[in-house]
Every structure is written in C-alpha cells, then in structure tokens.
Amino acid sequence: RTLIQTARRALDDAGFTDVPIIAGTGAGSTRETIELCHEAADAGADYAIVITSGYFAGALHPKALKAFFTEVAEKSPLPVVIYNCERCSFDILFLSLTFYSTVPAASGGIDLDSDLITQLAEECPNLCGVKLTYVL
C-alpha cells in the first residue's frame, strides 16, 4: 500500500497524473487476491495485474482457473490484467519491474491456453488485458 501511495504521489507531484499504476495483486487464494485488489485501489492504483498462484498448480483444472479469474474480475474495483507466466521464476518477476505482494514460486508452470483466455475476455467485462510471458 505504501509503495503504491508513494508512487502515485511522486507521479502526481511531477506532473504525470495520467501515468497509470499497475499493481500486482495475485496471491495464494481468490479471497486474498480480491482483498489486494481493493487495497491497491484504495492506495491509488489504476489497474491490477493478477498471476495465478503456484501453490496449487497441480490441482488447478481449467474450470478452477476460469472460476478464479471470473470471481476476481467481478469483485475487483480495478480493471484486471491476466498475467500468464507459464515458466516464471522468482528473479524474473522482480526483473519485470512489476511489484508483487506475494511471489508464490511464481505460477507453478500454469499456462492459460488461448481458449480459456478468450472465454474470460468474452465473459468478464472487467478484464482489460493479458500479459504473456514465457521464460526459457
């Protein structure tokens, strides 16, 4: 929260009031992700970027992933960017210059396929984009 507030204040003070802040709000559970979306909005963020939790990667069926992103998009006060990071590592997340409140061994190798991303885009008006990352 402090990081977002400080960044917003610094941007505004420098005359960059139109520069958006995208806050990483992906966490270990749907509830926590939604809470972080609300905290980021209250702190001055303009968008949330959400990565799936790597903690439960082996148990996440495409239906569960769809339910996760659908609920987050419906309950987030911020527009949501899906962060599909199939083979991310801890280091890459920090090198991407995106702040993450939690980095749960990144995404655990979860790869959202194009069909699922398309379904989410069609059904969730609060989803506003996708960041695709693949690390060799």
Image (cartoon, helix red, strand yellow):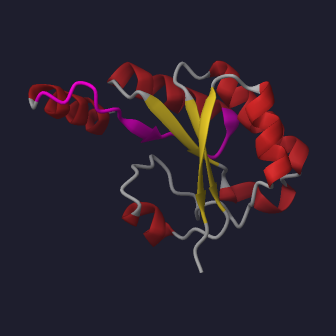
Q: Quadrant of residue 132?
A: bottom right
Dominant secondary structure (helix, strand or loop) of the stretch shown in magenta: loop
| Relative vertical location of residue 59 with respect to residue 70 in this rendering, above or below | below
Magenta stretch bounds: 15-30
Residue 49 position, x and y percent, is: 53, 41
Quarter where residue 72 is shown: top right
Q: Residue at x 65, y 20 (%)?
A: 75
Q: Position of residue 104 (x, y in %)?
A: 58, 58
Q: Residue 9 in the image: state x and y as whole percent.
A: 18, 28
Residue at left offset 28%, top offset 26%: 18
Residue 71, by quadrant, is: top right
Q: Is residue 8 left or right of residue 29?
A: left
On the rendered image, what quadrant is the C terminus found in? bottom right
Say if 63 sits above or below 127 in the image: below
Q: What is the quadrant of the N terminus in the image? A: top left
From the viewer's perspective, is 67 left or right of 16?
Answer: right
Asked whether residue 132 is drawn in magenta, I would say no
Q: In terms of depth relative to the viewer, which is nearer, 42 or 134? A: 134
Residue visible at 87% across and 49% down in the picture? 62
Relative horizontal placement of residue 73, taking residue 120 as reference (left or right): left
